[in-house]
Amino acid sequence: VDDDQNLEYMPYQRFKQCWKEQVQARGFANASLVVALYRTIGFKACAAMVSAVVLEMFLQMIGMVIALDTLLSYLERESARVQEHPGQPRSYLEPSLMVISLI
């Protein structure tokens, strides 16, 4: 990096400094990349990143099961309603939005 005052390179320079400190303190083989990254971005950014990962995992696993259960329950209720009232027009908006939310 040629220009030390360029703001685009400030995170890089901060990480480089933290990495050098890790290498000096613990040696190259025992230096921790995670600690250097943590010192570079700080507690708030790490907490936000961990929270985002946990939320993503929740939505991928549990949220998808809940959404699928809701869609299937709606389709069962709609099927029973159509059998009870065969002449009544159907609404395709709600199931379409549910399918789109699953995608």
Image (cartoon, helix red, strand yellow):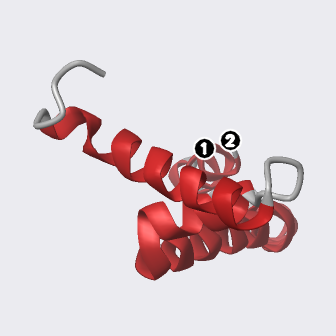
Q: Quadrant of residue 61?
A: bottom right
Work out how far the residue at label 2 is from the one at label 1, CA to CA, in angstroms: 5 Å
Disc 2 marks which amino acid? Ile
Question: Three-letter amino acid code at disc 1?
Answer: Ile
Please provide percent x and percent y for residue 94: 56, 58
Question: As displayed, is residue 38 above or below residue 87?
Answer: below
Residue 100 shows which numbered tag? Answer: 1
Q: Give yes or no for contact between labels 2 and 1 (Cβ–Cβ under 8 Å).
A: yes
Q: Is residue 41 above or below residue 20?
A: below
Q: Is residue 64 above or below residue 2?
A: below
Who's the residue at 26% across and 44% down the image?
10
* Image quarter of the N terminus: top left
Identify the residue at horizontal 48%, vertical 44% (top origin).
16
Is residue 68 in view?
Answer: no
Crowdedness near tag 2: few (<14), some (14–19) or many (≥20) residues, C-alpha within 10 Å:
few
Q: Residue at x 42, y 80 (%)?
A: 44
Quadrant, the C terminus: top right
Residue at the outermost top position: 2
Please state which of residues 99 and 26 is positioned toward the viewer in this rendering: 26
Left or right of 80: which side holds 95?
left
Residue 67 in percent (x, y) is at: 75, 66
User: Residue 75 vs residue 92: left or right?
Assistant: right
Residue to which mark 2 is pinned? 103
| Position in image of residue 62 (x %, y %) | 83, 73
